[in-house]
Structure formats: structure tokens, C-alpha cells
Amino acid sequence: MDDITVHRHVLDELEYAPMVDAAQIGVTVENGIVTLTGHVRNYAEKGIAERVALWVRGVRGVVERIEVRYPDNTSVGDEALAERCARVLEWDVRIPEDSVTLKVEKGCVTLDGCVPHYHQKAAVDKALRRLAGVTDIVNIIAVKPPVQATEVKSRILAALRRSARDPDTIRVRVDGDRVTLDGCVDVWRERELAERAAWSAPGVRAVEDRLMLA
């Protein structure tokens, strides 16, 4: 599909898109790459315009240069916006408590932290995009799956078997990203191997070693 046709289709889609004032958005196309310019009334409208352009057949990519211009009476300072964002995240039951930190600079919200699932990372973005004062969102939240007790146990047993041992006296308890090792081992080296194996499991951030020498 040639650039002229893609350009026309993107303009048509923006015209029919809900919540988008197409008259304020400029569109250029070169080799299937769409560049969006102009300004919108809020960050949510900016996101809609970008998604609409990406949906058009023949579009190979989108360069988004749209500026968010809030009406003067809804201007929000960074400190107030940060407080508002923190409160929204605190109220959202989909987002684990104390899993996300944020920084606000000139309306740009940078999100950091770690959550167990991708849908929780997306939920943070979705929760904040409609807040007045947000001009951009940078989401660098890491996604790390929850620690599985069976995986930790199997790693420990595998490590000890490699040292010609096959213990069945080690108990593994997992609480979030914290692993507790309990039980008995025959020699000190087995205790070190068990602890090292626990640390090697994905997502583990703390290991409490309660292993005793038999």
C-alpha cells in the first residue's frame, strides 16, 4: 500500500476515533512509517491516537510527537500529581502493595519496581493515564513470576545429587520472594549447596537458612 493511501486511511481513522480531536493532530507518512504531531487535551487521547494509527493496514511503525496541552484550569504541579498517582495505585487492588515506585517531572510519570505478572504492569499504566496533569508515562516496571516452592526444592535436590547425595530431610517454605530452608544435612557443604541453589531460583530475594547438621 502506498504512502498516500496510508495517510488518507490514518486521517479517516482518527476522524472516527472516540475521544480524539483529529483537527489538532498532524499526520505524515514515509515508507509506511507514520509520524503524529500536534497536541491533545490529555494523555489518554495521545495513547488512543497512537493505537488508532497502528491499527491501519500498511502502517509499519509510528513515531509519536504529540504534545499534551491541558486546559489552564486543570494544571497540576508535579508534587500534587505524584501524590495523586500514589493514591490511585494504593487503591487499585490489582497492584501488589509497595511493588511500584514513581517519579514525576514536568508531568512525565516514570514507573519503576517489580510485579509478578504482566497484567499488573499494564494495570499501573492504565490506572494513571487518565489523570489530569499526566503528559507522559515511562513504564520500566520489571515483571518477575512468583517463586515456586517445587522449583526451589528441585534445584536444591539437583545440586545435592551432583555431589553424590540424595537427602530427603530438607524442607522448603516459600513466602512471596522469601525462601526458608529447614531440616537436617549430613555435612556443612550440603548446607552451602542448598542455600546456593535456593538463591539461584528465579525471583528469590531472601533466603533464611535454618538447616542443622545431623
Image (cartoon, rainbow, N blue to C red):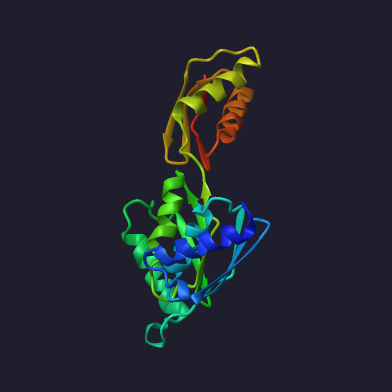
Question: Which residue is at the far bottom?
Answer: 72
Viewer-closest of 106 and 37: 37
Viewer-closest of 172 and 128: 128
Figure disc tally? 0
Q: Give the quadrant of residue 48.
A: bottom left
Q: Residue at x 41, y 78 (%)?
A: 80
- For this view, does 113 lie left or right of residue 132? right
Q: Residue at x 33, y 57 (%)?
A: 92
Viewer-closest of 128 and 46: 46
Q: Residue at x 46, y 25 (%)?
A: 150
Where does residue 152 sit, x and y in percent of width and height?
51, 28
Where does residue 206 sit, x and y in percent of width and height?
52, 42
Where does residue 95 sit, x and y in percent of width and height?
38, 53
- For this view, does 71 lie left or right of residue 167? left
Question: Which residue is at the far right?
Answer: 31
Q: Give the quadrant of residue 191.
A: top right
Viewer-closest of 28 and 83: 28
- Can the viewer see residue 145? yes
Q: Give the quadrant of residue 21.
A: bottom left
